[in-house]
Amino acid sequence: MKNLMPMKGLLLIAGLIMAGVSMAGEPSADVGEKIYTRAFGRGCGTCHDVQPNPNLFESVNKLSKEELTKVLVEGRNAMPKAMDQIMNLGPVKSAGLTQDQAVDSLIAYLKAGKK
Ligand code: HEC
C-alpha cells in the first residue's frame, strides 16, 4: 500500500490539469451577442445602432482585429474605453474567456450579422 502514495499525488496533479483545461473558455458568437447587447448596461447598440456613429456590423469588415482591440482598450474620441466593461460581464466571466477570446466572440457575432 505504501508505494501507492506517489500515484495518488500524480492523479491529483492530473486532475488539476484537466480541471484547468475544462475551465478555459472558447470564443462564441453567443457570448459576442451578449457583449453587444449588455456592455455599458444597455449595450454597444445604444450608440452604434444610431447614425452617424459607426455601424459595428460594417466596421468589423473594415478593421483588423488589432485595430478593433485598440479602440476597445484605449477608447477613441466619443468612444469610451470598453475592455474592462466587457471583461466584467457575467457571460464573459462564466465562459472563462481571456480578453483575446472575448474579442473573438464579439467579432464572430458581428460577422454573422444581426439576427
Ligand atoms: C457612448 C456611446 C458608445 C458606446 C456605449 C460604445 N461606443 Fe463604440 N464608438 C462610439 C463612437 C462615437 C465611435 C466613433 C469614434 C470616433 O469617431 O473616433 C465609436 C467607435 C467604435 C469603434 C471603431 C469603429 C470604426 O469603424 O472605426 C469600435 C470597434 C467600437 N466603437 C466598438 C464598440 C463596442 C464593442 C462597444 C460595446 C462594448 C461600444 N463601441 C460602445 C460610441 C460608443
Image (cartoon, rainbow, N blue to C red):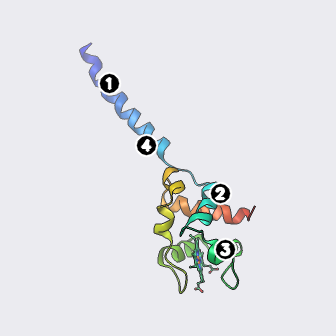
Callout 2: SS:
helix
Taking the spot 55% from the left edge, 81% from the top edge, the residue there is: 79
**Disc 3: residue Cβ within 8 A of ligand 1's nearest atom:** yes
Examine the rendered structure and indicate whether residue 19 appears above or below residue 11.
below
Is residue 95 rendered to the left or right of residue 13? right
Image position, residue 51 (x, y; %): 70, 83
Residue 91, how many percent across, how many down?
Answer: 54, 54
Q: Which residue is mark 4?
A: 20
Task: Give whichever of discs 4 and 3 has the lower sequence position.
Answer: 4
Where is residue 28, by image quadrant? bottom right
Q: Position of residue 60 (x, y in %)?
A: 67, 72
Q: Earlier in the sequence, mark 4 or mark 2?
A: 4
> For this view, does 16 lie left or right of residue 96?
left
* Label annotation for residue 8: 1
| Mark 2 or mark 1: whose residue is earlier in sequence | 1
Amino acid type shown at disc 3: Leu
Q: Nearer the viewer, residue 82 or 38?
A: 38
Q: Give the residue type that dot 2 points to.
A: Ala
Counting residues from the start of the chain, the first of labels 2 and 3 encountered is: 2
Marks 3 and 4: in contact by CB < 8 Å? no
Location of mark 2 (residue): 29
Q: In the rendered structure, which disc, 1 or 4, sits on the residue that comes first in sequence?
A: 1
Q: Quadrant of ligand 1?
A: bottom right
Give the residue at x 48% y 54%.
93
**Disc 4 on helix, strand or loop?**
helix
Whole-Å distance between the Cαs marked 4 and 3?
34 Å
- Between circles 1 and 3, the one closer to the viewer is 3
Q: Residue 12's spot in the image, x, y percent?
A: 35, 31
Earlier along the polypeptide chain: callout 1 or callout 3? Answer: 1
Residue that mark 3 sits on: 56
Dot 1 and dot 4 residues touching (CB under 8 Å):
no
